[in-house]
Image: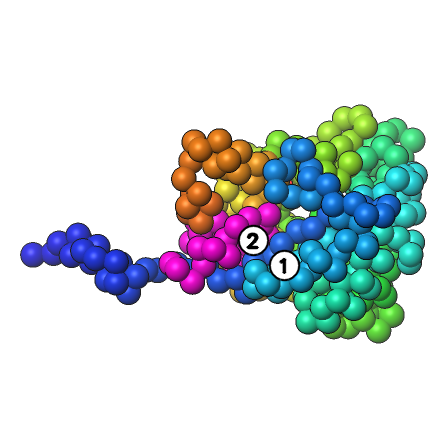
């Protein structure tokens, strides 16, 4: 007689047969850096997540290290915005300064930079706008490549294009190789959906589009097959790591990509997913272990790498499970 409950009978047995465990080493923690001095200010829409000025990074990076986090992803917030995102490829821009400072504080930290234009354009779109108000794919490539190169020059270990332009992975690989950055990896936001779950992030990064939406470049949330094609294209163009984003409403997409592709697969547990659970926990509506359960489900679905604002929260559960 088979009895399913036999293997749930006590804690040690449950731990023995546990199929999925999270590890701090597979987590990526996003951080927001902002121009100015002496700034550590909580982002209103994301409780427990802060904007940091460069001079406040030392303390934060040490704290991140003390939690066992080895990978971070940097987002920059700038005051100067224009049509072509010039502060994004300024070698002395906020992200470039942050990369240099973090590498000084912690040479071992794996520093990944988000490569996009929306934080730096006056219209908040992720590319160059043409006369018809349409985001011009091929014109945007040159600028995205310049941003990636500038991050690599500052010392980034990996660049993560999140713009969803076609051919940007190839354009970035080419410019990196031509400039000798053959070992700077590309983590491509391959299947990035036009999601409502980015709301809090756009607050944090001051990157909401001034008109229209991102539906001509980010994917329709209803589509699965298209996500597999996007992953395939990015691998063909040279992506070292592919990504599905968001994560929790897209576990089927993560599963599908993990079964089809052999490159490492990342999933982005985005700002809206974070804020929903964090607020519920803070209000006492959900037990804090809901955080572990949610992030673990992303791994169970097949992600190898998880980008999550919960990385510090998870440190207290990981190792106990
Ligand atoms: C930039 C970018 C976005 C996110 C990561 N990179 C926002 C967007 O596409 O509007 C979202 C991250 C999050 O919600 O946590 N394009």
Q: Which residue is mark 2?
A: 312
Q: Measuring 58% from the left and 50% from the top, which residue is drawn there? A: 308
Query: Which badge, 1 or 2, is on the more N-terminal residue?
Result: 1
Q: Measuring 86% from the left and 29% from the top, which residue is drawn there? A: 133
269 relative position to 144: left or right: left
As drawn, 87 above or below 209: below
Q: Callout 2: helix, strand or loop?
A: helix
Q: Measuring 69% from the left and 39% from the top, which residue is drawn there? A: 42
In the picture, the disc for residue 64 is 1
User: Residue 60: which quarter of the image?
Assistant: bottom right
Q: Callout 1: helix, strand or loop?
A: helix
In the picture, the disc for residue 192 is none
Asked whether 285 or 172 is in front, the reply is: 285
Asked whether 215 or 34 is in front, the reply is: 34
The picture places residue 226, in percent across and down from the top left corner, at: 59, 44
As drawn, 247 above or below 233: above
The picture places residue 178, in percent across and down from the top left corner, at: 86, 70
253 relative position to 201: left or right: left
Q: Measuring 78% from the left and 31% from the top, which residue is drawn there? A: 209
Asked whether 119 or 168 is in front, the reply is: 119
Taking the magenta stretch, the answer to whether it contains residue 24 is no
User: Residue 127: which quarter of the image?
Assistant: top right
Where does the N terminus fall, quadrant-wise?
bottom left
99 relative position to 17: left or right: right
Q: Which residues are magenta?
A: 295-321
The picture places residue 192, in percent across and down from the top left corner, at: 64, 44
Where does the C terminus fall, quadrant-wise?
bottom left
């Amino acid at each position: 007689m088979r009895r399913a409950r036999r293997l749930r009978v006590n804690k040690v047995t449950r731990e023995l047969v546990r199929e999925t465990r999270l590890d701090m080493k597979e987590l990526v923690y996003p951080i927001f850096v902002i121009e100015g001095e002496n700034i550590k200010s909580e982002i209103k829409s994301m409780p427990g997540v802060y904007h940091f000025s460069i001079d406040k990074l030392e303390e934060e990076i040490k704290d991140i290290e003390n939690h066992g986090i080895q990978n971070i992803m940097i987002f920059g917030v700038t005051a100067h915005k224009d049509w072509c995102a010039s502060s994004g490829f300024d070698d002395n821009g906020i992200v470039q300064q942050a990369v240099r400072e973090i590498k000084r504080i912690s040479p071992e930290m794996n520093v990944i930079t988000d490569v996009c234009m929306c934080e730096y354009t006056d219209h908040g779109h992720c590319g160059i706008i043409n006369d018809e108000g349409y985001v011009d794919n091929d014109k945007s490539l040159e600028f995205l490549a310049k941003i990636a190169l500038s991050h690599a020059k500052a010392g980034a270990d990996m660049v993560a294009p999140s713009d969803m332009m076609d051919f940007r992975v190839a354009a970035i690989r080419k410019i990196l190789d031509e400039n000798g950055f053959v070992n700077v990896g590309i983590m491509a936001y391959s299947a990035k959906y036009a999601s409502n779950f980015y709301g809090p992030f756009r607050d944090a990064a001051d990157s909401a589009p001034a008109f229209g939406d991102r539906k001509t470049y980010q994917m329709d949330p209803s589509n699965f097959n298209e996500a597999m094609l996007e992953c395939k294209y990015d691998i063909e163009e040279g992506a070292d790591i592919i990504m599905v984003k968001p994560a929790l409403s897209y576990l089927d997409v993560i599963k599908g990509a993990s079964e089809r592709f052999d490159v490492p697969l990342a999933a982005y547990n985005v700002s809206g997913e974070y804020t929903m659970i964090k607020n519920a926990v803070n209000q006492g509506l959900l037990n804090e272990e809901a955080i572990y359960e949610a992030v673990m489900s992303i791994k169970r679905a097949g992600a190898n790498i998880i980008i999550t604002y919960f990385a510090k929260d998870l440190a207290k559960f990981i190792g106990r499970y």
